[in-house]
Image (tube, rainbow, N blue to C red):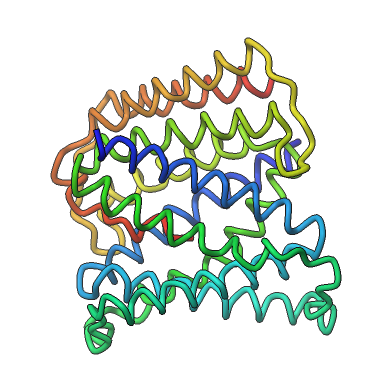
Amino acid sequence: MIVGLLFAAIAGSLVSLQNIFNSKVNERASTWSTTTLVLGLGFLASFLFGIAFEGKQLFNLQDMKTWYWFSGIIGVGVVTCIVNGMRLLGPTYTISIMMTSQLGFALLFDSLGWLGLAQVPFTFKQLLGVLIIIAGIVVFKFSGSSEKQAVVKATKYVS
Amino acid sequence: MKGIIFAFLGGAFITLQGVANARISQDIGTWQAATITQLTGFLMALLILLLVRDGKWRSFMQVKPLYLTGGALAAIIIFTNVVAIQKVGVTLSIAVILIAQLALTFIIDANGWFGVVKQKVKMPQFIGIGMMIAGVLILSS
């Protein structure tokens, strides 16, 4: 359990760093140039790590299903939704709604065991935990200064 | 209303991305999953970039090289995200990811690191993060 939580914390910290770096790029370049660069480098880095750790095994894709080839397109959906959300609602509302939705769908995926992941039974305790986290997000996001929110860009969330 | 739908779907897609990566990793391996999803995402973004024609490639030259490398972090983000989902489930993983993400951004803003505009720390922000941690403790108890 500790490993899982630690890895999630590493992932979240790196998302934060990546968000800041990407928004620096997005200050100068367009949203889609930034997205293309970010995903291109993500591919290159994953490929190099893959070669380093797996060698030729990286190219062994015999259990590949057709839809796996299309899953990367979800990232493009993420950017499109956030760009439009930010434009229509502004960052504070967009990020609060987005994080709430992220947690809500997480709970749904866990309790239904969709896509063949191990099912985590839905309990009242889980619902309570998620609701308190969402309340925390709202308190955090709506207490932050508005200048800070203004620099948030959609490409932050591209990975 | 349209904005709310976009934000809602954006969040759904982010979770779906993590779950899909975890699923694909079970079959072909995590580095394979990361490589393929980033490659197909890159090709799709490139296609859109060519269609909308808003590419100003030269503008990359005005950005500090360090900031251009942010995309490479995705390799480690996907890997750690997949392992976390496999070990503790989607809900707990996403909850901890969001806390770490908000907390580090908060620390960077408070110190003005990476040339971001320094922000004053506000009490309710601590309360917000505290509530999120309390929620995770309830989830994992």
Image position of A94 (left or right of A98): left
Considering every residue shown, the one lying at the far left of the view is A147
Image position of B68 (left or right of B13): left
Q: Residue at x 27, y 25 (%)?
A: B123
* Quadrant (top left, top right, bottom left, bottom right) of the N terminus of chain A: top right
Identify which residue, A10 or A102, lies in the foreground. Answer: A102
- Percent from the top left, x then y, of residue A142? 24, 29
Identify which residue, B37 or A48, lies in the foreground. Answer: B37
Give the quadrant of residue A138: top left
Give the quadrant of residue A32: bottom left
Identify which residue, B51 or A96, lies in the foreground. Answer: B51
Considering every residue shown, the one lying at the far top of the view is A124
- Percent from the top left, x then y, of residue A47? 65, 79
Image position of B83 (left or right of B52): right
Q: Is residue B41 above or below residue A102?
A: below
Q: Is residue B66 above or below residue A66?
A: below
Give the quadrant of residue B106: top left
Image position of A128 (left or right of A15): right
- Percent from the top left, x then y, of residue B65? 35, 81
Q: Residue at x 30, y 58 (%)?
A: B113
- Percent from the top left, x then y, of residue B89? 70, 36
Q: Residue at x 40, y 41 (%)?
A: B102
Q: Is residue A54 above or below residue A106?
A: below
Q: Residue at x 81, y 82 (%)?
A: A55
Q: Is residue B2 above or below residue B79?
A: above
Total marks in image: 0
